[in-house]
Amino acid sequence: MGIIVNLDVMMAKRKIGLTELSSRVDITMANLSILKNNKAKAIRFTTLDAICQVLDCQPGDILEFVPDEK
């Protein structure tokens, strides 16, 4: 399976919407939506840092490794 992005979970826990997070992190809503919906192929450390600062969380709260089933 690989890396799963749990951004939507952290956003719900912090009660912050896509529009607010987008403006506070300074990332487009389209790019944030791609990340939130697990469609992103990569994330910059600067973006991850900004998201973690706004959501007051650790990168491991957002990114999760799920091994492939054999």
Image (spheres, rainbow, N blue to C red):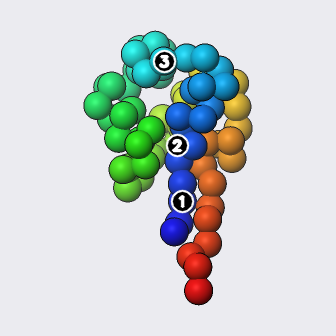
Asked if residue 68 is positioned above or below residue 6 in the image, the reply reads below
Query: In the rendered image, is residue 21 in sight?
Result: yes
Q: Position of residue 54 (x, y in %)?
A: 60, 21
> Dot 2 corresponds to which residue?
45
Q: CA distance from mark 2 to mark 3?
A: 21 Å
Query: In the rendered image, is residue 52 in sight?
Result: no
Q: Secondary structure at mark 3?
A: loop
- Which residue: 62% across, 32% down? 10
> Dot 3 corresponds to which residue?
17
| Picture disc at residue 3 | 1
Binning the other alpha carbons within 10 Å of mark 1 as few (below 14), some (14 to 19) or many (20 upward) gives: few
Q: Nearer the viewer, mark 1 or mark 2?
A: 1
Binning the other alpha carbons within 10 Å of mark 3 as few (below 14), some (14 to 19) or many (20 upward) gives: few
Closer to us: 12 or 35: 12
Q: CA distance from mark 1 to mark 2?
A: 15 Å
Q: Quadrant of the C terminus?
A: bottom right
Q: Which amino acid, mark 3?
A: Gly
